[in-house]
Image: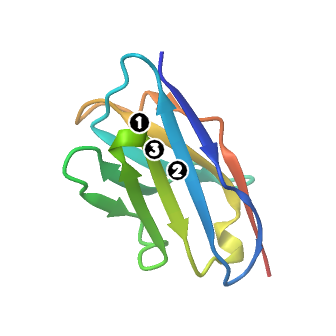
Amino acid sequence: QIQLVESGGGLVQAGGSLRLSCTASGRTFRSYRMGWFRQAPGKEREFVAAVKWIGGSTYYADSVKGRFTISKDNAKNTVYLQMNSLKPEDTAVYYCATQSDPGVSYAYWGQGTQVTVSS
């Protein structure tokens, strides 16, 4: 069983920064791609960013390009999301997830961490 634990959420003023972390554990953990998603109240969950575990290619939603940076530390089984120039519309619960192979869905999800951006 794979477990993902997020941390780093909180309350920040608009224009501020936060760094989220997500650490994976489990005897059989391996990943093709790790991603960050978010869900705001009353809205559907949406993709934020992803990184390939091998090679490090990154992918971003248009709404966060230039403001958010995803990175990873393979030795620590950890993925990060550096969020700068935060906006009130970035307020959401942020989840990390792992995709084991290309073409399959993200199978394992963390419990989520709340990010609140005040105006």
Q: Position of residue 104 (x, y in %)?
A: 30, 30
The answer for how far apart the CA atoms under marks 1 and 2 are is 11 Å
Q: Is residue 64 above or below residue 80?
A: below
| Horizontal side of residue 89 vs 76, given as left or right | right
Q: What residue type is labelled 2?
A: Phe
Q: Where is residue 82 in the image (x, y as percent from the top left)?
A: 52, 66
The answer for how far apart the CA atoms under marks 1 and 3 are is 11 Å
Q: Earlier in the sequence, mark 1 or mark 3?
A: 3
Q: Earlier in the sequence, mark 2 or mark 3?
A: 2
Residue visible at 42% across and 74% down in the picture: 65
Residue visible at 22% across and 36% down in the picture: 102
* Location of mark 2 (residue): 37
Q: What residue type is labelled 1?
A: Thr
Which of the labelled discs sits on residue 78, or is there none? 3
Residue visible at 42% across and 41% down in the picture: 76
Q: Which amino acid does label 3 sit on?
A: Thr
Residue visible at 38% across and 52% down in the picture: 72
Q: How is the image coloured?
A: rainbow
Which of the labelled discs sits on residue 98, or is there none? 1
Which residue is outermost to the left? Answer: 55
Nearest to the observer: residue 61 or residue 100: 100
Q: In this view, does 77 lie above or below 37?
A: above
Q: Where is residue 38 in the image (x, y as percent from the top left)?
A: 59, 53
Q: Is residue 113 above or below residue 27?
A: below
Query: Could you classify mark 2 by the number of other residues whose Cα lies within 10 Å: few (under 14), some (14-19), or many (20 or more)?
Result: some
Q: Which of marks 1 and 3 is in front?
A: 3
**Secondary structure category for the residue under label 2:** strand
